[in-house]
Amino acid sequence: MPVLYDKLVRGKAQADYPNAQAVKLTHNERQRNRLALMLSQGQAAAIVLHRGQFLQPGDVLLSTEGQALIVEGAVERLMQITAETNLVLMRLIYHLANRHVRAMIRSHAILIEPDAVLEQMVRQIGGHVEFVEQVFEPEAGAYAGGHHHQGDGDPADRVMGNVGEMLSIAAHQARGKHAR
């Protein structure tokens, strides 16, 4: 029977949980509220968090039976973007932000998830692309979790987002017809 981990603990030392198992999760997996997985010792597990709760490396999850699970970031293939000048790097950040691309910002580079279209754009603007392997921890953003876009998260949320967007478009079109 799977172990259900449904309590998130932040800011506690991992040493407080000496018998805890660790689980490596990609950035996308850490952004899900519900996740089924197999632990390294072959135990089935389910992570069920409240809507809006997301995992970070170092978080601890607890089961109702008191078992602990430590979250680690999984190494992922990323595009590391650099430029010859700070101006070109700032232009690249502007264009990526304009497309709402999740990014890790470093003093000398931008790291994003691989995307062939973005890779081409980066090269056209004058940036350099190298593929690297590391844990992806993009910027949280100014609103840190309070701002989500259509396509993020749960499929049911995506459907409701699509419905809301369709209603908004219809309302704007109707308003335009009445204004003439």
Image (cartoon, rainbow, N blue to C red):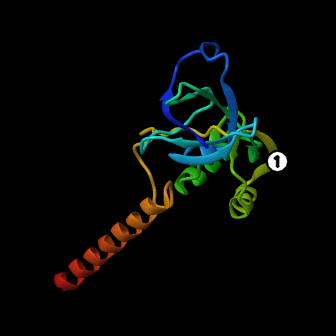
Camera sees residue 129: yes
Amino acid at circle 1? Glu
**Residue in the picture at 23% in, 81% down:** 174
x, y percent for residue 81: 74, 46
Camera sees residue 32: no
Residue 38 in the image: above or below residue 8: below
**Residue in the picture at 69% in, 61% down:** 121
Say few, some or many: other residues with alpha carbon within 10 Å of mark 1 (under 14 / 14 to 19 / 20 or more): few
Residue 13 in the image: above or below residue 87: above
**Residue in the picture at 30% in, 73% down:** 167
**Residue in the picture at 40% in, 64% down:** 161
x, y percent for residue 71: 63, 32
The residue to which callout 1 is attached is 130
Q: Is residue 67 left or right of residue 124?
A: left
- Local SS, label 1: strand
x, y percent for residue 131: 81, 48
Q: Is residue 137 left or right of residue 157?
A: right
Q: Quadrant of residue 87?
A: top right
Q: Is residue 164 left or right of residue 95?
A: left
- Say which of 143 and 64 sits in front: 64
Q: Is residue 104 left or right of residue 180?
A: right
Q: Quadrant of the N terminus?
A: top right
Q: Quadrant of residue 117?
A: bottom right
Q: Quadrant of residue 133?
A: top right
- Say which of 137 and 180 sits in front: 137
